[in-house]
Image: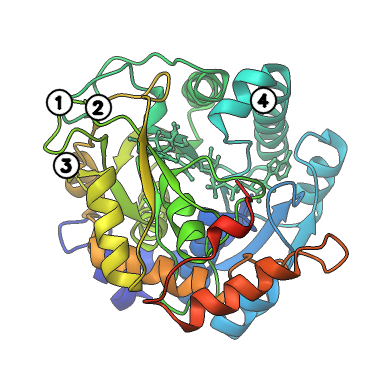
């Protein structure tokens, strides 16, 4: 594992090879490990010699990811279908298993939905996290990596480093903000616990095999899943939210990060925790490079050979023109930086989406009268340069 880890935790890391060998046998629980980022991280952890278990209630994921992970790793990942809000079940799991660390991905994550259903978001994300922390404390599991988000930063159009002021604009963001406060307080009160908070920017792409990827339930909220669904004919047209921002083409600029780079960032953070005697560390995971909506559309068209129909519409409420990470702290502390560029992000996303037009699910059922959609998918996937049949139905 030392040699493969060093591929993404560079020689500038502070870890000793001795620690690497110890890490190899560690048992890591990935809450939310059946989801998009979790499944890619489970794969990398397994490939790097960790023993991994998944705890997920499958609210926004599918059990069908498990055989795919087994196919890719050659190993079965133990799966516990558990709701993290069920304190008793979480405690039982920690009592029965001997976890050395937790990567806590589980949570609800849709900004718009959090505005409509704030109590659900606060209850799920906060109660679930408290249950996990209590079980970790009770059963002596002292290392945690937490999935936070760039959404915790106050609006800021300069490259964002970890010292920038915090402040959120929606309940989803506040759950991340509050969990960060809980974790820093918990680490102060329990000095033998080591905690890593990772603030992700915009994760995209998929494993290069095309066997695992992002599988949104319902209409995608994020740009790239929407673009991908236009490409396979599930959606007619992308709405580009505003072209009057102060950016090179007027459309919003974001810091997109390949999900495999993100997954590797977790392993570097985890490895760092195993060298610490306690404390809470915070890092951005981003590339430091920004691309606009139209840059992304163009890059995806090139990768897929598809034309992406789009129309310019009003700005989306709450959006900023530019959001880019300053990811230099992760490089300095873990030796981690992104390795994969825009082409790999788009090619892998297309491989996943074109091989799995409906994600892990089967296509629309015949009873719902959607046979014409299936026909359209076959057409679009087989005749990439041909016209679209989108006008015959509307799925958005
Ligand atoms: P995802 O929805 O694919 O994965 C989250 C997983 O958590 C799902 O499998 C879901 O079933 C599970 N889950 C939710 N509530 C649960 C509960 N009560 N008990 C057990 N499992 C539960 O999302 P993702 O994109 O993989 O995101 C993973 C984490 O990263 C989330 O915490 C998210 O907020 C955070 N994050 C995501 C992004 C992004 O753009 N994808 C950006 C920043 C941060
Ligand atoms: C990217 C760009 C849009 C959709 C969100 C969350 C954030 C984090 C990551 C979890 C913007 C434009 C989008 C579309 C578009 N998630 N866009 N048409 O808004 O940077 O961040 O996901 O923590 O919390 O807020 O990502 O993918 O939604 O948007 O034009 O249909 O694409 O305006 O410029 P965002 P996004």
- The residue indicated by pointer 2 is 321
Which quadrant contains ligand 2? Answer: top left
Mark 3 or 4, nearer chain start:
4
Q: Which residue is mark 1?
A: 246
SS under mark 4: helix
Residue 121: numbered disc? 4
Tell me: residue 348, above or below residue 16.
Answer: below
Query: How far apart are labels 4 and 2 at the CA level?
Result: 26 Å
Name the image quarter holding residue 365: bottom right
Quick one: which residue is furthest to the left in this view? 248
Mark 4 or 2: in front is 2
Q: CA distance from mark 4 to mark 1?
A: 33 Å
Q: Return the disc, 2 or 3, that comes first in the chain's sequence.
A: 2
State the residue in front, 120 or 245.
245
* Horizontal side of residue 169 vs 310, given as left or right: right
Q: CA distance from mark 3 to mark 1?
A: 25 Å
């Amino acid at each position: 594992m030392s040699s493969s880890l060093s591929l993404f935790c560079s020689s500038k890391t502070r870890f000793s090879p001795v620690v690497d060998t110890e890490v190899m046998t560690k048992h890591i629980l990935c809450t939310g490990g059946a989801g998009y980022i979790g499944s890619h991280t489970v794969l990398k952890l397994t490939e790097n010699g960790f023993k991994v278990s998944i705890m997920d209630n499958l609210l926004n994921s599918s059990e069908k990811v498990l055989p795919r992970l087994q196919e890719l790793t050659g190993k079965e990942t133990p799966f516990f279908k558990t709701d993290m809000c069920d304190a008793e079940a979480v405690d039982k799991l920690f009592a029965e298993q001997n976890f050395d660390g937790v990567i806590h991905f589980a949570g609800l994550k849709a900004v718009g939905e959090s505005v409509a259903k704030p109590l659900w978001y606060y209850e799920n994300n906060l109660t679930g996290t408290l249950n996990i922390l209590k079980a970790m404390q009770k059963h002596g599991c002292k290392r945690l990596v937490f999935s936070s988000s760039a959404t915790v930063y106050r609006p800021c159009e300069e490259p964002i480093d970890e010292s920038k002021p915090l402040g959120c604009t929606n309940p989803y963001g506040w759950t991340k903000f509050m969990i960060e406060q809980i974790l820093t307080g918990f680490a102060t009160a329990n000095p033998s616990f080591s905690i890593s908070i990772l603030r992700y920017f915009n994760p995209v792409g998929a494993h290069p095999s095309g066997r695992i990827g992002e599988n949104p339930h319902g209409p995608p909220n994020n740009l790239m899943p929407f673009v991908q669904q236009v490409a396979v004919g599930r959606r007619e047209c992308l709405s580009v939210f505003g072209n009057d921002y102060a950016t090179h083409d007027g459309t919003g600029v974001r810091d997109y990060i390949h999900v495999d780079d993100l997954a590797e960032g977790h392993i570097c953070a985890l490895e760092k925790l195993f060298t610490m005697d306690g404390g809470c560390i915070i890092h951005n995971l981003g590339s430091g490079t920004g691309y606009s909506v139209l840059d992304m559309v163009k890059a995806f068209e090139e990768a897929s050979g598809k034309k992406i129909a789009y129309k310019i519409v009003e700005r989306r409420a709450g959006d900023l023109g530019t959001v880019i990470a300053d990811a230099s702290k992760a490089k300095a502390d873990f030796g981690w930086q992104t390795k994969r560029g825009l082409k790999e992000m788009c090619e892998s996303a297309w491989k996943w989406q074109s091989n799995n037009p409906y994600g892990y699910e089967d296509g629309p059922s015949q009873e719902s009268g959607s046979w014409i959609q299936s026909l359209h998918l076959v057409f679009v996937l087989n005749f990439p340069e041909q016209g679209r049949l989108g006008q015959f139905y509307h799925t958005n």
